[in-house]
Image (tube, rainbow, N blue to C red):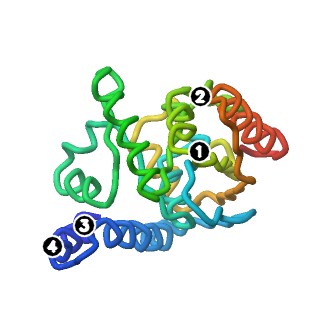
Amino acid sequence: MALYFIYFLITRPFKKDKLAYGLQIQKAYTSVCLFLFGTKHSMEGKIYDGTALYVSNHRSLLDPVIVRHYITALGVAKAEIANYPVLGKAVAQTGIVFVDREDRDSRAKAKDAIVDSLKAGNSILLFPEGTVSGERTTLPFKRGSFQKAVEANVPVVPITLLYNDKKYHWFKIRTMPYYFNSFGWHTPNVHMIVSDPIFDKDPERLMEKTRHTINENLLSEAYN
């Protein structure tokens, strides 16, 4: 990971469209990761042909890697990642919006950045639960991002991630055991469902429709 992003940081200054290059590197990196991890993955549905707010359920560390393998979108991540050696600086330049959940000003700036990005024609990927859980369905969503989708006049595209076994969910398990469990001899099989885009001028309805769509997909599977 470090070597890959060092290469990106060295070559980025020579690229004219730095954001496009960052997103290109981001997508290529997901292919490398999934190959090295041996992760089996598949997709069902059609990628929306336009700017959208992609909203996904959250199960594992692999979630953003799987989604970005198929979809080109800017991400939203917790602020502390920006302080990680090499990785923090690199991901910041591949098109990540950082947010400190404990800081109201940071949350407001992140929401403004989401609107600006959407209006500029850049899709956004986020996980509105804010964390992983052991529930069968999603945790309640945060409403703010859906308000921003309305302001930017873009649809929300629900993404559902289904793992073939609950043991691959990162919930109440320490980091190292989780790594060995997910990327050791046995690796997860992840299926991604891309649902139809949802258009609504009411952010509350937009949020509930999105959550309902994802939960219906989660409840339809034996493992999730």
Q: CA distance from mark 1 to mark 3?
A: 26 Å
Instruction: Give the residue displayed 71% in from the left and 43% down from the top.
Output: 224
Residue 84 place in picture, x, y as percent: 21, 47
User: What's the residue type where badge 4 is placed?
Assistant: Pro
How packed mark 3 is, by other alpha carbons closer than 10 Å (few <14, some 14-19, many 20 or more), is many
Foreground: 223 or 87?
A: 87
- The residue tagged 2 is 141
- Secondary structure found at label 2: loop
Which label number is shown at residue 13? 4
- Secondary structure found at label 3: helix
First along the sequence among labels 1 and 3: 3
Q: Are the residues tagged 1 and 4 within 8 Å (C-beta)?
A: no
Q: CA distance from mark 3 to mark 2?
A: 32 Å
- The residue tagged 1 is 55
Q: CA distance from mark 2 to mark 1?
A: 10 Å
How packed mark 2 is, by other alpha carbons closer than 10 Å (few <14, some 14-19, many 20 or more), is some
- Secondary structure found at label 1: strand
Report whether 93 appears left or right of 155. left
First along the sequence among labels 1 and 4: 4
- The residue tagged 3 is 5
User: What's the residue type where badge 2 is placed?
Assistant: Phe
Q: CA distance from mark 2 to mark 4?
A: 38 Å
